[in-house]
Structures are given as structure tokens and as C-alpha cells.
Image: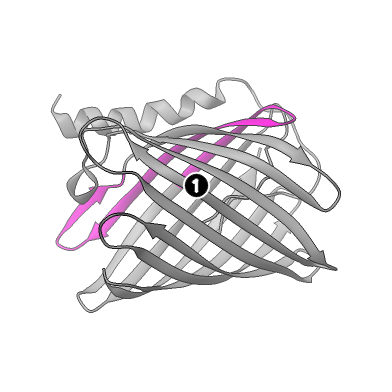
Amino acid sequence: MNLSSTRLALALVLPFAVVWLAPSSATGQIAADRPGFGDGTTTVAPGTVQAELGAAAANDDFGTNGELGQLLLRYGVADVLELRGGVGSVALDAPGTEYTGTSVGGKLRLAQSSLSAFSLVSTWTLPTGTGAFESDRVSQTLALAYDGALGEGLGISVNGGTEVPYGGDADPSYLFIPTLSVDLADGIGAYVGYAGFYSTGLNTNYVEAGLSLLSSPDTQLDVNTGLQLDENRSAFVAGLGLAHRF
């Protein structure tokens, strides 16, 4: 088995290690960590599996490329703790295809009140990508997530944290993702936000917006758009997604 095959096998097997128990039904409105760059503070109910996936396309001065998969599996361990596994995506960048790699991690709710909540999200990115996503080291992203109510149907979410590569001499990078959300109607929500990723090299900046539709108590659909405006490139991004609770 060559290196690419080994990485693909790891990508398919490792995330499913977080869902080794049969899920039970959960109640209440589904809370997905998509669409958008940031994560919310809500954890999946104990004994429940939630799958989130999607597809996106980006257009810039060099043409159009796509991404298919974006699969995140979430498993509730306790009321305040979930485990997470990212299966990753196939990146469609003509004339070839690449794999974005896999990740494992967890979310721990630190505090919650009627108006706000804090959670800690830890994600370990594993060296399983190919092509432009190939890496020989593990990196960890550690972020604090905040959700707060601003008024009737209006809320704010903020993620702030750092990504630390292990091994080698690479410097850490930082993220800041504020998002405003609003309930438009029963089961329909909208959001607008900014996502910044800062490093010693070129920074990456996005503005984003989207809609979500709760099509059933256990299924949420979404459409999302974004603009990348920075020294790296200028690009328009659009995507569709699905989150389903089992």
C-alpha cells in the first residue's frame, strides 16, 4: 500500500472511532456547526450521532474549483462533552483531485446561562491530506466559542483561538470569527460574519453570509456564500450543506 492509499484508509477509518456506540434519539432543535467558519457552543446530546456535510465551489482569477464532502461526525458522550471526527473533502482542482485530510477532536461546554454560553473546541488535524493539503505533521486548533443573545431572535457568536503545528519550526497561527445570526421565521435562520486567520506570513480574510432551514426536527439544510479578500487572492465562494441527527 502506497503513502496516498495509507492516508486515505486512515481518513476513512479514524473519524468513525468516535461513533462506536449505537445512537439513541435526541429531542429539541438541531444545532449544527455549519454553515459558516465558526463553531457554536452547543454539544450533541448523549448517545446521539450527528453528521454534517456539504459541497462548495470557489471562483477567482485562476478559474473555478470545488470541494465535495466537508463531512463532520459528532457524538455526544455526556451533557457537556462531544467527540468529533472530520472525514474531510475531495478537492476538485482541475486537472487533478486532492484530499483535504482528516481530523479528530472534541467540544466541552464550560458554562451556560439563559443568555450566553462558552465552550472549548479542540481539533487535531492529522497528516492524511494529499497534494496541496499534504503535511508530515500533526497540528492542533484550540478555540474558545461564545454564544450570546442580543435580543428577540438575534444572537452573536465569537470564536477565538490558535493553531499550533507540532514538529518542525512552523509558527502558530490565530483565528478570530465573529458572527451575527437572526431568526427570520420558524425554522429559518440567517447569519453574516467575518473569519480571519492570521500568521507570520500572509493573512486570510473572509466575509460570509448564509441561510439555514430546519426541514425536520432532525435535519437542517443550508446555503452559504463568502468572499475572500486578502493578499492571497480574491474569490467568491458558494456552498450547500446538510446536517442530520440520528
Tell me if residue 36 can be seen. Answer: no
Q: Is residue 113 above or below residue 107?
A: below
Identify the residue position indicated by label 1 in the image.
Answer: 161
Reply yes or no: does residue 89 show up in magenta: yes
Indicate the position of residue 106 as horizontal and vertical percent values: 55, 32
Q: Residue at x 39, y 26 (%)?
A: 13
**Which region shows up in magenta?**
71-100
Q: Residue at x 15, y 24 (%)?
A: 1
Left or right, 128 with reference to 190:
left
Tell me if residue 23 can be seen. Answer: yes
Front position in the image: 90 or 183: 183
Q: Residue at x 72, y 34 (%)?
A: 45
Q: Is residue 79 above or below residue 27?
A: above
Indicate the position of residue 62 as horizontal and vertical percent values: 19, 75
The residue type indicated by label 1 comes to Gly
Indicate the position of residue 145 as horizontal and vertical percent values: 61, 48
Q: Residue at x 69, y 49 (%)?
A: 31
Reply yes or no: does residue 238 show up in magenta: no
Which residue reaches farthest top? Answer: 21
Q: Is residue 90 above or below residue 50?
A: below
Indicate the position of residue 117 as horizontal and vertical percent values: 74, 46
Q: Quadrant of residue 246?
A: top right
